[in-house]
Amino acid sequence: MSVITKENRRLKRRRRVRAKISGTATRPRISVFRSNRGLSAQLIDDVNGHTLAAVQWFEADLQKAGKAERATRAGRLLAERAKAAGVTEAVFDRGGYRYHGHVRAFAEAIREADITV
């Protein structure tokens, strides 16, 4: 009998989502990773295999904030970096995580910064 852990269930959801979405140079994929300590995200062009922009929870201007505020600030920061890279729209890859809490706050912050997701 095999044991299916929480992480295995999340990875199964992640693979299911990734089978349906892909990023391009004009519309990259926003890939989210959430840990117990924070949130990281990348803008990825899957066609060329390049990361266009990224944000990590341990950056200096994000580290001092609380977890909920950190996710919102990370969304704004990634949106600024996306605009600098010439990106105005993207597809959102929640990475198998439920769309609530920090993941939702992050996505809404990106939308508020005029990036079409």
Image (spheres, helix red, strand yellow):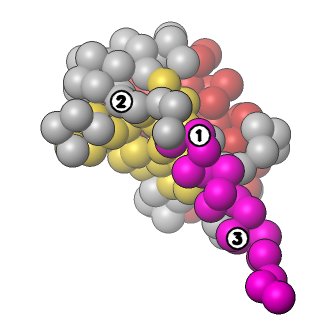
Does residue 70 appear in this view?
A: no
Instruction: Report the residue that reaches farthest toward the front.
Output: 1
Q: Position of residue 34 (x, y in %)?
A: 63, 58
Q: Dot 3 lies on which element? A: helix
SS label for mark 2: loop
Question: Which amino acid, by three-letter code, is at mark 3?
Answer: Glu
Question: In the image, is residue 30 part of the stretch drawn in magenta?
Answer: no
Magenta residues, start to end: 1-18
In which quadrant of the rendered image does the C terminus lie? top right
What residue is shown with label 1? Answer: 17
Label 2: how many Cα within 10 Å (few below 14, some 14–19, many 20+): many
Q: Quadrant of the N terminus?
A: bottom right
Give whichever of discs 2 and 1 has the lower sequence position.
1
* Above or below for 74 versus 24: below
**Residue 112 screen position, x and y as percent:** 61, 16
Could you tell me which secondary element the residue under label 1 belongs to? helix
Which residue in the structure is indicated by mark 2?
Answer: 23
Q: Is residue 113 left or right of residue 100?
A: left
Residue sitting nearer the eye, 81 or 92: 92
- Labels 3 and 2: the sequence-earlier one: 3
